């Protein structure tokens, strides 16, 4: 029995800015709000984690999902 591989895509439905956190939440079967809050907290409290730059890079690298 073969199944389609799960692909990381930016979310079309769970999108606030670019759909990066929503897409990661869909990929890992998590709540999108939890992923967003964790990403913001990690960005604020970690000096070694340039969150905005990483978000922009992920925005460029992760393809957009064209369907629901």
Image (cartoon, rainbow, N blue to C red):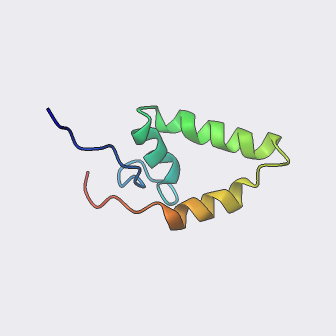
Please state the total of marks drawn on the protein image.
Answer: 0
> What's the residue at 72%, 39% (across, down)?
41
Toward the front, the furthest residue is: 1
Please, is residue 57 above or below residue 49 in the view?
below
- The residue positioned farthest toward the bottom in the image shown: 60
Q: Position of residue 55 (x, y in %)?
A: 62, 58
Name the residue furthest right. 47
Residue 61 location (% of width, % of height): 51, 64
**Which residue is painted at 17% across and 37% down in the image?**
2
| Of residues 61 and 20, the one drawn nearer to the viewer in this rendering | 61
The residue at 28%/61% (across/down) is 66
Q: Position of residue 56 (x, y in %)?
A: 61, 64
Above or below, 56 relative to 48: below
Please indicate whether residue 23 sits to the left or right of residue 21 in the image.
left
Spot occupied by residue 60 in the image (x, y as percentages of width and height)? 53, 68
The quadrant the N terminus occupies is: top left
| Residue 36, above or below 11 | above
């Amino acid at each position: 029995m073969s199944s389609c591989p799960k692909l990381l895509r930016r979310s079309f439905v769970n999108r606030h800015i670019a759909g990066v956190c929503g897409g990661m939440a869909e990929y890992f079967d998590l709540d999108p709000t939890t992923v967003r809050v964790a990403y913001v907290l990690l960005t604020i409290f970690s000096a070694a984690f340039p969150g905005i730059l990483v978000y922009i890079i992920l925005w460029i690298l992760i393809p957009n999902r064209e369907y629901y």
